[in-house]
Amino acid sequence: MIKIIVFLLLSSTLLFGQQTEKVDFLELNATVTIDTINFEIKGQVEVSFRTLRDVDSVYLDAVDMRITPSESNTLKIVNTDDKIWMTSNFKKDKSYSATFSYECEPKQALYFVGFNSTLKAYPSQVWTQGQGKYTSHWLPSLDDMNDKIIFNITYEAPKNYEVIANGHLNKTRSRLNHKSWYYEMQKPMSSYLVGFVMGDFRRTAAKSKKGTPLQVYLETRHLDKMSYTYQDHVEIFNLLENKININYPWQNFKQVPVRDFLYAGMENTTLNTFSEEFVVDSIGANDRSFVNVQAHELAHQWFGNSVTETSSRHHWLHEGFATYYALEVEKEIFGDEYYYFKLFKTAEELKTKSDSGQGQVLVSPGGSSLTYYEKGAWALIILKNTVGEAVFQKAIESYLTKYAYKNVTTEDFMTEVEFHYGQPLTNFKERWLNQKAFQSKETLLFLKKQEFIQNYMKLAAFRETRLSLKTDRISNALDFPVNDYLGQEAVYQLNGGDFDLSIPLYKKAFETNNLYVRQAIANSLTSIPTELKADYESLLKDRSYTTVEKALFNLWRAFPEDRHTYLEATETSVGFQNKNIKLLWLTLNLATPDYEPDKKPSVYGELSKHTQPGYPYQVRENAFGYLYQIDTFTKENYKDLMEGVFHPVWQFKKFCRELLDTLMKSEKHSKALQKLAQDFSIREKTFFNTRY
């Protein structure tokens, strides 16, 4: 066995990265057992493939897996640290199959969430994230996106959980304490798009205008938020399918929120997993719209899932198109002004990066999200503006039809556009695809065709002008019916101005009753004059968790004599999924000594417990932040912080490490942490001792 592995490692160098030229994997049928006790995945796999030339070995990617070949195989199967090798005297244009079982404890790409927690309010979940993490950590598959496979997977899960996965749920079967979920696909896809979610979910079903089944899920505890979270989901699907004008390329479309997700959303084929942050009630829906994420991930079902890049050099073909079509959907739902203002802001951001020498070529590996998403969307907008809407639409339709379930390059797409346009687009390609600089003059000319953008830019031009010279302009911008964006800009220009002049204008802004204009006041007016106290207090009743959070803190700080009143007014408010208002309230309660003094221990306990690993990382980060501000940590808080330095969400991991660095500079906290180090896990001790 060792000799075979060494031979494979030495002789198969040329096969790496070129396997698609020698073999085509066709179908992978698997049974995947989810072990929530040992945090393991166990499975049985039957994979079929066709060799494109004579070859002696082919492989699947499989990271740290224990493999047991079936005795029925006619070929040899061995595995290395990251691959499963199948060896035989394979002949060109012949079909083969292999069967084996496997076990693994995934270190990434599959996550067991909440199983070690005692928090009943947050049911346990298992979910996957293949893109950038590689499905091969939990399912033998292919890291190379150029070989597309039809995946049919049966999931074995504890009976009390729902499993949502790629494709059509053909049937379920219950036995003892387990339930089997049989999912089937009809078309091939890249392995990074394989995914599933397991948890305490319930669904609502609908159908698109053309009959595609649409299924949306929430945890049982959140069912009252179903209509607010998914309020536009059918309309979004119909709008997008109509705009693209190519039938949805898969069997159905499902959407599921998960806790501690690594990104905003992920476009697994037929299965959009997204961050639980977007689960909202009627108030949260005013602050956190799920429309963009829904539309973006849905657009990927065409652009990325059906038609897939050959390499990361062409990644804008995924993200640029998804961003472009999400904007098109938002334009229909929220209106032209929303659309053009969003474009204006992304153009400003791209120009700033470009002017500072940080511009990036669009068709290039290793680009930033700003480049692939926003510059990519802008490239498509300018391309449509150049060739005309009719030509652009024909090119999109032929591109999606010609390359359905295949892989493409930027050249493939541009060839379709040039064919329908009837002439080369050399200048466009040079300026938008191959140049680092952002074409800000061209985008500005495009935007300034809109009267709204002209009016906004005229008002924004007065940001550095003294208030006494622009009071009329500010007042006019606040006239009824106030424009969301002009009204906010007017409010922001009042900040820092002469109060004698600004107070009447602030009052006018309050009286607009525009949610976003009033939110701008809460965001910018942090030193509250007495003349505006009553108006400012009215913000505590606005239907915006963002506004209430800002207003509560600003009022509490500005008027100490009324702190009890403000705390009483917001005592039952929780806020978003990150408990933004609740955790602020607990902190302000502790910082108000004469407010319910006998309850301080329980209030501190309530705040302190939110650093536990069972809570969403956004809640934990807020709690850690407030505990740092009041400079009080328990032993459990320190332990929770150490656990966080290995969290799979990189932003939270970074936050925990930076907070730990800060605490270690304090003698008090450093001593406490050093004393606790003996209780850390081996991994935590190694990290702690190496870093400090």
Image (cartoon, rainbow, N blue to C red):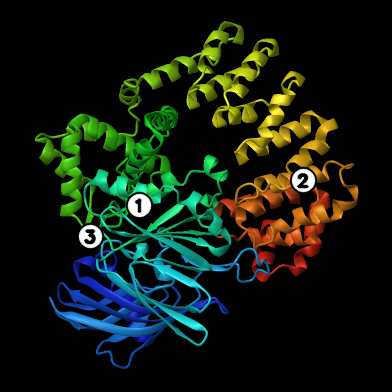
Residue in front for this viewpoint, 45 or 489: 489
Q: Residue at x 42, y 29 (%)?
A: 341
Dot 2 alpha-carbon crowd within 10 angstroms: few under 14, some 14 to 19, many 20 or more: many
The residue that mark 2 highlights is 587
Label 2 and label 3: CA atoms lie apart by: 53 Å
Mark 2 and mark 3 lie on one chain; the one further toward the N terminus is 3
The residue that mark 3 highlights is 405
Label 2 and label 1: CA atoms lie apart by: 40 Å
Residue 217, horizontal then vertical, whole percent: 46, 61
Q: Is residue 263 visible?
A: no
Residue 27, horizontal then vertical, whole percent: 26, 74
User: Disc 2 residue type?
Assistant: Thr
Residue 62, horizontal then vertical, whole percent: 39, 73
Callout 1: helix, strand or loop? helix
Position of the N terminus by quadrant: bottom left
Dot 3 alpha-carbon crowd within 10 angstroms: few under 14, some 14 to 19, many 20 or more: many
Picture layout, residue 418 above or below residue 603: above
Please tell me the numbered disc located at residue 500: none
User: Disc 1 residue type?
Assistant: Leu
The residue that mark 1 highlights is 298
Callout 2: helix, strand or loop? helix
Q: Nearer the viewer, mark 2 or mark 3?
A: 2
Q: Quadrant of residue 587?
A: top right
Residue in front for this viewpoint, 572 or 589: 572
Mark 2 and mark 1 lie on one chain; the one further toward the N terminus is 1
